[in-house]
Image (cartoon, rainbow, N blue to C red):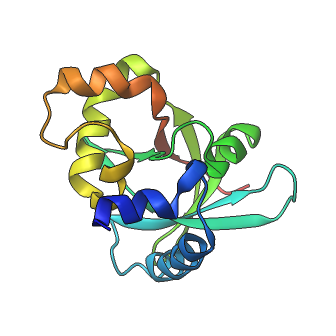
Amino acid sequence: MTSGAFARWLYQGQRPNWIARIMNRACAAVASLGIADGYMASLEVIGRKSGRAASLPVVLAVVDGQRYLVSMLGDNAWWVRNVRAAGGKAVLRSGGRESILLEEIPASRRAPILKEYLRRAPGARPHVPVSKDAPLAAFEGIAAAFPVFRVVARPPT
């Protein structure tokens, strides 16, 4: 099994299987320590059904000085649905705790962010049907399928 096939197997049906969930918990714990600050963090979102906080590791794409999060699994990823239900409120942890607001970016503006995300997140490449080296036009063709959120600092309440 190739590494791409293994990565797709971990997220069959666009949901992490039990192995991926264990790996995500471990990576989220490491990311929250700030070891890869500016590159990787732990995103904490309140569950729309459970009301409990859930965390997952995320790779930050930085374009023109702005930070972005991308869903490699598309619209049906649990964290995307929870972020939308929470009005964009979430927490990033990377050495510290940062209250944030995630603003969804329209599909027409996602292509350069998706390209940068694939450059920075090799684990996402098997889930996105475009090569990281593809021209921007190729990313424009798939942009609607992959939600992108701009990270905005939120003052503490």
User: Of 22 and 83, which appears nearest the observer?
Assistant: 22
The picture places residue 108, in percent across and down from the top left corner, at 38, 17
Position of the C terminus by quadrant? bottom right
Q: In this view, does 105 lie above or below 70?
A: above
Q: Quadrant of residue 38?
A: bottom left
The picture places residue 7, in percent across and down from the top left corner, at 40, 62
User: Of 32 and 101, which appears nearest the observer?
Assistant: 32
Q: Is residue 130 above or below residue 69?
A: above
Q: Indicate left or right for 34 with 1 as reference.
A: right
The picture places residue 44, in percent across and down from the top left corner, at 63, 63
- Residue 48 visible to an observer of this rendering: yes
- Residue 154 visible to an observer of this rendering: no
Q: Quadrant of residue 92?
A: bottom right
Q: In this view, does 34 lie above or below 74?
A: below
* Residue projecting furthest to the top: 108
Seen at 19% across and 44% down, the residue is: 132
Seen at 56% across and 42% down, the residue is: 102
